[in-house]
Image: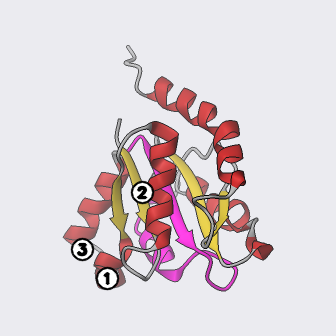
């Protein structure tokens, strides 16, 4: 199983990256590949960059993608938007199970992953079977809502991934 975390934080090696990797591992017991979008940010400003195309293919080849962003101005980052714009509408994430996740400084934006990030992932063709996860960036490792979210949604993700990895034909 290929598990990937896409991190849209403009700060490298951020808490967002840590939280996304932790969520992916908690969902699957698989060590994820972490793609920190800031590492190739300037390449996103043009179309057809080979390094970006390679990264897109790695994301498209994933069974599960956790898309993680901090909350900036009540939504996901422009950096993440630049990256997601590189994917084809409707088919760019077809066949990929995606989980939207956002961190923020306070509870006011707790609906942001569900209302803002998840629709973009669905527009790109991803299957998003869970509610988006929002956590406070200061307490995600110890917040009881993390475990409650996992208890509710891990079986759904596991079921989909088990079905996706079953050979057909």
Residue at the location (60% across, 37% down)? Answer: 154
Q: Residues within 10 Å of mark 2 (few under 14, many from 20)?
A: many
Picture quadrant of residue 59: bottom left
44 left or right of 131 in image: left
Residue furthest to the front? 142
Residue 22 is inside the magenta segment? no
Residue assigned mark 3: 49
Residue 50 can be seen in this image: yes
Image quadrant occupied by the N terminus: top left
**Can you tell which of label 1 and label 2 is closer to the viewer?**
2
Residue assigned mark 1: 46
Q: Is residue 33 above or below residue 151?
A: below
Alpha-carbon span between mark 3 and mark 2: 21 Å
Do the residues bearing badges 3 and 1 touch, measured as CB atoms within 8 Å? yes
Where is residue 27 drawn, in percent x and y? 52, 41
Picture quadrant of residue 104: bottom right
166 left or right of 55 in image: right
Residue at the location (52% across, 51% down)? Answer: 23
Highlighted magenta segment, given as a residue range = 62-88
Most foreground residue, 152 or 156: 152
Alpha-carbon span between mark 1 and mark 2: 23 Å
Q: Is residue 78 above or below residue 150?
A: below
Residue at the location (67% across, 62% down)? Answer: 134
Residue assigned mark 2: 5
């Amino acid at each position: 199983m290929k598990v990937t975390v896409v991190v849209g934080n403009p700060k490298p090696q951020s808490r967002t990256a840590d939280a996304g990797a932790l969520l992916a591992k908690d969902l699957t017991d698989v060590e994820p590949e972490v793609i920190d979008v800031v590492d190739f940010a300037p390449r996103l400003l043009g179309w057809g960059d080979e390094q970006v195309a390679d990264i897109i293919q790695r994301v498209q080849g994933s069974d599960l993608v956790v898309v993680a962003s901090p909350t900036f101005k009540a939504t996901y980052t422009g950096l993440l938007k630049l990256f997601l714009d590189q994917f084809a509408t409707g088919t760019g994430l077809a066949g990929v199970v995606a989980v939207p996740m956002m961190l923020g400084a306070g509870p006011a934006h707790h609906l942001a992953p569900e209302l803002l990030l998840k629709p973009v992932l669905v527009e790109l063709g991803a299957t998003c079977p869970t509610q988006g996860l929002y956590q406070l960036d200061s307490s995600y490792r110890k917040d009881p809502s993390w475990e409650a979210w996992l208890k509710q949604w891990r079986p759904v993700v596991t079921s989909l991934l088990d079905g996706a990895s079953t050979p057909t034909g």
